[in-house]
């Protein structure tokens, strides 16, 4: 099972060649489409496993056998009302991907991520993940010890209308999460962000650091 929510259409993905049995994603990240749909695929092996279940799926909402009857077999089984406007949005987003070219899109995300990482290093910041396994579409930046991470987020949002997120779980208060994906993956956006972040770092020093 592979989570490609933040990578579909942003980094190389070969579901069949890699033998992925279950792969799911989202529309609002690298595809650049409004949220609400979750692209999902099952291999033949996975569907055979599901079909051979000894017990009935308890969750109606998550029962892929019902969805399979609804979509794949043509059986007249009601499951849900399809979100037509979201489907059209996804269709248009995929057309944009096709126009750019999938390989070109992968290349753009990588080049702009490298540009961001270099810029972060130039202003004295360090990425949390090693370069060899870093995701181009989502960068985790280590928070300097003399800066209040929450205040930086608020400062960027209020002064520059730039939204970044804090760390989750064990990384709460230790990193910022910076998305660079889809339409927003542009060098000019990186330049704007780096300039704004540098300003925020200067303005959001912890009080004890100023003593």
Image: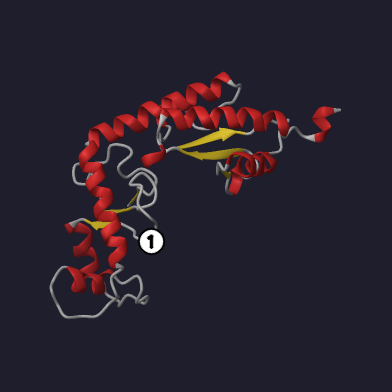
Q: Is residue 46 above or below residue 77?
A: above
Tell me the SS state at disc 1.
loop
Across and down, in percent, residue 16 comes to 19, 46
Q: Quadrant of the C terminus?
A: top right
Taking 138 as reference, is 47 left or right? left
Q: How many marks?
A: 1
Q: Residue at x 61, y 44 (%)?
A: 157
Q: Is residue 126 left or right of residue 27?
A: right
> According to the image, label 1 marks what residue?
36
Q: With respect to residue 103, does 8 lie above or below?
A: below
Residue lying furthest right? 211
83 left or right, relative to 147: left
Q: Residues within 10 Å of mark 1 (few under 14, many from 20)?
A: few
Residue 170: quarter of image:
top right
Q: Position of residue 130 (x, y in %)?
A: 47, 28
Q: Position of residue 166 (x, y in %)?
A: 59, 44
In the rendered image, which quarter is residue 106 located in? top left
Q: Position of residue 77 (x, y in %)?
A: 21, 80
Question: Observer-nearest residue: 197 or 130?
Answer: 197
Q: Residue at x 23, y 64 (%)?
A: 49
Q: Position of 104 compared to 130: left or right?
A: left
Name the quadrant containing residue 45: bottom left
- Residue at the location (64% across, 40% down)? 159
Q: From this viewpoint, which residue is outermost toward the top?
A: 122
Q: Judge whether 115 appears above or below 203 on screen.
A: above
Q: Nearer the viewer, residue 58 or 4?
A: 4
- Residue toward you, 205 or 162: 162
Residue positioned 32% across, 75% down in the render: 57
User: Between 122 and 159, which is closer to the camera in this rendering?
Assistant: 159
């Amino acid at each position: 099972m592979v989570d490609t929510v933040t990578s579909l259409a942003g980094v190389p993905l070969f579901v069949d060649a890699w033998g992925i049995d279950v792969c799911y994603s989202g529309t609002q990240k690298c595809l650049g489409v409004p949220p609400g749909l979750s692209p999902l695929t099952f291999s033949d092996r996975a569907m055979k496993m599901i079909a051979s279940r000894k017990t009935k799926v308890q969750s109606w909402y998550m029962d892929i056998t019902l969805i399979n009857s609804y979509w794949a077999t043509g059986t007249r089984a009601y499951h849900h009302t399809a979100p037509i406007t979201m489907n059209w949005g996804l269709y248009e987003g995929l057309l944009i991907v096709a126009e750019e070219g999938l390989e070109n899109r992968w290349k753009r995300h990588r080049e702009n991520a490298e540009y961001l990482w270099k810029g972060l290093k130039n202003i004295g910041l360090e990425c949390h993940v090693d370069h060899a396994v870093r995701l181009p579409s989502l960068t985790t930046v280590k928070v300097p010890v003399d800066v209040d991470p929450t205040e930086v987020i608020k400062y960027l949002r209020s002064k520059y209308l730039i939204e970044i997120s804090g760390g989750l779980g064990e990384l709460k208060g230790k990193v910022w999460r910076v998305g660079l994906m889809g339409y927003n993956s542009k060098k000019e956006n990186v330049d704007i962000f780096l300039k704004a972040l540098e300003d925020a770092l200067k303005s959001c020093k912890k009080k004890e650091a100023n003593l």
